[in-house]
Amino acid sequence: MMKGVASKLTTCYVIAYDIPDDRRRTKVHKLLSGFGAWTQFSLFECFLSKQELILLKAKLAKHLDESQDSVRFYPLCAACVAKVVTVGDPPPKEITLFIV
């Protein structure tokens, strides 16, 4: 897979979270850092396969309080990723990550 080129096997997800508790928010931030790029406060861009998405959701569930916390996954198709307009930092690019 070429660096910076979206694979047909992955989808770009914009993942936004609202977690009022500092401890849980820090854990979620660290977890998401292993799956993608932190681009804004409480926002990540992650290129994930279906399996990685399932794994990420399972790991997140262990740290969330469903009565207070919110994590949203916004999938972007390849055509939409190509149309992302960014002022400042570069647009989302797929990077090769190794999850252990």
Image (cartoon, rainbow, N blue to C red):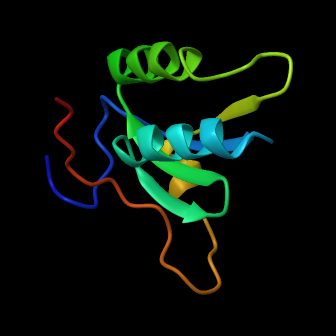
Image point (21%, 33%), residue name: 99
Q: Is residue 77 visible?
A: no
Q: Residue furthest bottom?
A: 88
Question: Is the residue 2 above or below the residue 47 in the image?
Answer: below
Location of residue 69 by image quarter: top right
Q: Position of residue 77 (x, y in %)?
A: 54, 40
Question: Is the residue 25 above or below the residue 54 in the image?
Answer: below
Please name whichever residue, 39 or 48, is drawn nearer the observer in this view of the structure.
39
Image point (74%, 40%), residue name: 21
Q: Quadrant of the C terminus?
A: top left
Question: Is the residue 46 above or below the residue 42 in the image?
Answer: above
Q: Residue furthest right?
A: 67
Q: Position of residue 50 (x, y in %)?
A: 39, 18
Location of residue 65 by image quarter: top right
Location of residue 97 by image quarter: top left
Q: Residue furthest front?
A: 23
Q: Position of residue 41 (x, y in %)?
A: 66, 62
Q: Relative to 29, is 23 on the left or the right?
A: right
Image point (53%, 15%), residue name: 62
Q: Position of residue 32 (x, y in %)?
A: 46, 41
Question: Is the residue 2 above or below the residue 1 in the image?
Answer: below
Q: Is residue 23 visible?
A: yes
Query: What is the count of numbered marks?
Result: 0
Image point (48%, 13%), residue name: 58
Please name whichever residue, 26 or 82, is drawn nearer the observer in this view of the structure.
26
